Image (tube, rainbow, N blue to C red):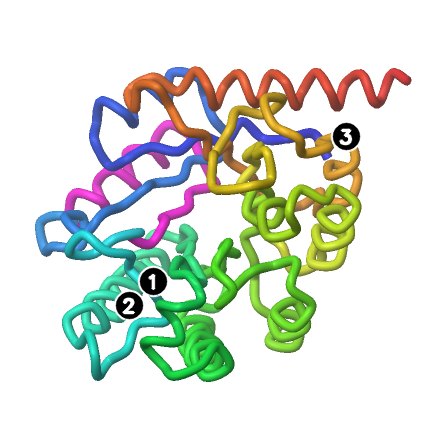
């Protein structure tokens, strides 16, 4: 697979235009709770149409990561945090409806919280995971081929975990595989990472290419961490799209994302030559 130039931005015109000048083939919108207001959703729709008008065919909307200064969790307790639950469900419903209307994709993150937070919400990890899968089933039924689910470093929804992987395969979910998240879950073990990526490749429709040292969430530029990209790229789904979800020094300058693409493109070209 030769990687796509996939770039991520907020819904601001400044960030969007900065990305578009490099002619990405994949564009992912990072949304927040302000984008989920009535006016925010109208603006988001306008920005999607604007990006589509430039010829970008593959557009992904990332479900908001936060609500009211805490994570926007699929595994939120409707009883203990009714406002959080209402926001999570309403925002997912609204984005899926928009995605169907404009023929784009919605990415929903399977989890953010650590083990203790999930246990505090539902009593134990097993119950919390069941709640997550029940809700993902609902989103899948609602969105069909317009929705995908991303792995976390949270034990609630972490690829690299045999039990989770068996479940997502059994449910036939469309997946987004964040390479750095898998690597961190597997404590920097490239052998296990390659096995996980290969196992889930048939259901993976989108990748977040991100490097990591494999210890904590560091979102490194490709080539700056310990992921063996040469091996990973041999087992990814060649039909999937990708973006580079890298921490930026300046949110209005995508240079770390573009440098990651250059690194991976040169690596793949050298692999073909050799």
Please identify the quadrant where the N terminus is shown: top right
Q: Which residue is mark 1?
A: 96
156 relative to 197, above or below: below
Q: Residues within 10 Å of mark 2 (few under 14, many from 20)?
A: some
Q: Secondary structure at mark 2?
A: helix
Is residue 3 at all visible to an observer of this figure?
yes
Return the residue at label 3: 230
> Which residue is identified by label 2?
93
- Magenta span has 49? yes
Identify which residue is drawn at 33% across, 32% down: 9
* Nearer the observer, 146 or 135: 135
In percent of the image, x 18 and y 54: which residue is there? 36
Which residue is at the front of the view, 122 or 196?
122
Q: Secondary structure at mark 3?
A: helix
Q: Position of residue 120 (x, y in %)?
A: 33, 76
Q: Is residue 197 left or right of residue 115?
A: right
In terms of sequence position, does the residue under pointer 3 or pointer 1 come before the other?
1
Q: CA distance from mark 2 to mark 3?
A: 38 Å
Task: Give the label, 2 or 3, closer to the camera.
Answer: 3
The CA span between labels 1 and 2 is 5 Å
Magenta span: 41-64
Q: Who's the residue at 39% across and 20% down the image?
A: 254
Q: From the top left corner, tell me how far across and down residue 224 is, in percent.
A: 59, 22
Q: Residue 19: where, in percent of width, then height?
A: 37, 22
């Amino acid at each position: 697979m030769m990687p796509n130039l996939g770039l991520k931005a907020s819904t601001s015109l400044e960030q969007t235009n900065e990305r578009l000048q490099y002619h990405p083939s994949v564009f992912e919108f990072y949304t927040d709770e302000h984008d989920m207001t009535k006016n925010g959703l109208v603006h988001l729709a306008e920005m999607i149409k604007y990006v589509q008008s430039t010829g970008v065919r593959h557009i992904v909307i990332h479900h908001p990561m936060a609500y009211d200064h805490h994570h926007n969790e699929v595994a939120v307790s409707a009883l203990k945090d009714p406002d959080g639950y209402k926001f999570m469900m309403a925002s997912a419903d609204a984005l899926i409806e928009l995605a169907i209307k404009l023929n784009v994709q919605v990415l929903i993150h399977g989890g953010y919280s650590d083990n203790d937070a999930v246990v505090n919400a539902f009593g134990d990890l097993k119950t919390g995971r069941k709640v997550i899968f029940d809700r993902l089933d609902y989103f899948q039924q609602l969105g069909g081929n317009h929705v995908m689910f991303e792995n976390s470093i949270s034990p609630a929804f972490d690829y690299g975990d045999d039990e989770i992987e068996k479940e997502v395969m059994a449910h036939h979910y469309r997946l987004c595989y964040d390479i750095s998240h898998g690597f961190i879950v597997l404590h920097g073990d490239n052998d296990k990472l390659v096995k996980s990526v290969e196992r889930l490749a048939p259901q993976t429709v989108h990748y977040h290419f991100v490097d990591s040292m494999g210890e904590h969430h560091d979102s490194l530029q490709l080539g700056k961490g310990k992921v063996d990209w040469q091996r990973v790229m041999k087992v990814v789904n060649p039909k999937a799209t990708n973006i580079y979800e890298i921490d930026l020094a300046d949110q209005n300058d995508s240079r770390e994302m573009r440098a990651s693409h250059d690194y991976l493109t040169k690596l793949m070209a050298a692999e073909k030559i050799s």
